[in-house]
Image (tube, grey):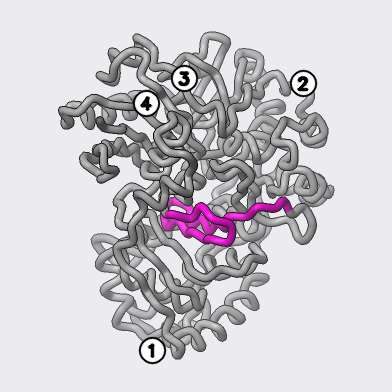
Amino acid sequence: MAIVCVDAGTTLVKAVVFAADGREQTVEREALAVHRPRPGWAEQDMDEVWTAVARTVRAAVDRTDEPVDFLAVTAQGDGCWLVDPSGAPTGPAVLWNDGRATGRTQRWMDDGVLDEAFRINGSLSSAGMPNAVLSWLQEHDPQRLAASATSLTCGGWLFSQLTGEIAADESDAAAPFLDITTRQYSTELVALFGLDDLARLLPPLRGDHHRVAPLTPAASETTGLRIGLPVVMAPYDIVSTAVGSGAVHVGQTCTVLGTTLCTEVVTGTVRLDGVPAGLTIPSGAPGRLLRAFPTLAGAGVLTWACRLLGLAGAGELGTLAATSPAGARGLSFLPYLSPSGERAPFLDPSVRGLLAGITLEHGPEDIARAVFEGLSLVVADCLRASGSASLELRACGGGAASDLWLQIIADTTRLPVARSADSEVGARGAMLVGSVATGAAPDVEHAAHAHVRDAARFQPDDAAAATYGDAYEAFLDLRPASRRPVLTGSAR
C-alpha cells in the first residue's frame, strides 16, 4: 500500500509517495510560473497548475510498485480562482500575494470594515483574499464575473479537476467569509464587503467529516491512478503544514519558512476581541483552530538578498551571515519587501523594507546577517501578536534547512526550535489528514504521534537572546519610518 500526496505551492508543485509505514518514498517536483502582467499583480494560469500537478503525480506513481490507497491534496490558499458553469477557468488565477486590490482594503481599513469583519471571522483581510479581489473585479472586470459560476482557491480547483466536484474546504473559506463560531458562510460578512450580488460564487463547504470523493475517469487517465480512488481535500497548505510538523495539540506552535513566513498556534477557543491581526482557521481536527500569521514577504527576501550581494543561493548567504556577530554590528533590517506591503502580524499596504544604521564600517556579511535577523524578528513579532504562550517552535519549509536561521529564530523567540525530519511537511500533513478521512487513523493526534519525527533541535543562547531583545525594540521603533504613501497602479 502507498499514499500519494500533493502540495501545490505558489512556485513549486510537489507529489510525494509515502510507503505503508509512513516513510517518504518518492518526491517529484515541478516549478510553477507566477505571471506579473502589471506592477503589483500576481497571477497563474490555472490549466498550467493542473497540468503540473497531473505530471508530478504520474511521475511519482510510475516510481512505485505498490497499489495506491488514496490521494490527498493541499495547496496554496487565498486568491481567486474563478470557473464557469462547466468548471473551466474564466481567466488567470489571482494569487494571494496580488496587490491590485490594495486600495480597496485600505478603504475598508479606514472605514472600520476590516475591524467589524474580524469580530465575526477572527481574520484580518488583505488585498489577495477573495473578498478584495472580487470587489476589485466588480469595478474593473464585471464581464469576467458574469461569466463565472464559482470562486475557488487552488485546492478547490485541483479537487474539481480530480473529482469533478465543486467545493471549498473550511480552511480555505474561513478568511474572509465564514462566521468562525458556526463555520458557515456569513451573510453579514458578504454584505459588509458589498458582495451581495456575488454570494452566488461561493462554493459548497466541506468540513472535517466530508473530505473524500472518487477520482474521475478523465483524471485517472491523466494521473495514472485508478478510477474511483479516494481523493482527499486536505486543508490548505499552511494548515496542512502545521499538522505535518506535529503541531496538533492546543498550545503547539509552528513556523513555515517558505514563500510566506507563517507562524501559527493551535488553539481550542475563538477570540474575536483585541487588535485585529492574522487569521483564525479550522485546523483539520474537530474543535481545533489555528491562529495564523502568514506574511507577504518570506524566503523570497533571501533570494533578493542573494541578488543584491551577488551570491548563488541561500546557502552562500547563510555562510556569509555566520561571519557577522549577533546584532549584525548594529544593522536593523525590516523585511517588508512585498509591493503589497504587509498583512501579518499587522496590515499596512504602505509599509516597505528598510535597512537602518549602516556605515562605511559595515560589510556584506553584516547585511546578510541583518536579513536573517529581520526575518526572525518577524517570527517573534507574530508570536507576540498571537497572545499565546509556547514551549517550543516547530519549523519547516525550505528555509528550515538553514541551521543558522533556525538558531537565530531560537535566539529571537527564546524558544527551542525543532526541525522536521520530512522534506515535504505540507504533504505529510495532507497524508495525516487523509489517513483520518479514509478511516486509516482515528484522529490527527494519533496519526502525528505515529509519523512525525524531528531531525534536529536548536536551543536559545542566553547572550544572543539578550542582544535580540534590544534589537526587537529597535525593530518596532523603526516601523513607522518604513511607511510610504500607496500610489495605486504604480510599482510603489
Query: How many C-alpha atoms fall within 10 Å of the one at disc 4: few (<14), some, or many (≥20)?
Result: few
Asked if the residue at tag 2 contacts the one at tag 1, i.e. Cβ–Cβ closer than 8 Å, the answer is no
Instruction: Give the mark nearest the N terminus, 1 or 3.
Output: 3
**Mark 2 = which residue?**
197
Instruction: Give the mark nearest the N terminus, 2 or 4.
Output: 4
Asked if the residue at tag 4 contacts the one at tag 2, i.e. Cβ–Cβ closer than 8 Å, the answer is no
Instruction: Give the mark nearest the N terminus, 1 or 4.
Output: 4
- Residue 15, given in percent of the width and then of the height, sits at 30, 35
**Mark 3 = which residue?**
213
- Residue 429, given in percent of the width and then of the height, sits at 42, 44
**Mark 4 = which residue?**
48
Q: Nearer the viewer, mark 3 or mark 4?
A: 3
Q: Which mark is residue 296?
A: none
Circle 2 SS class = helix
**Mark 1 = which residue?**
361
Q: Which residues are magenta?
A: 246-270
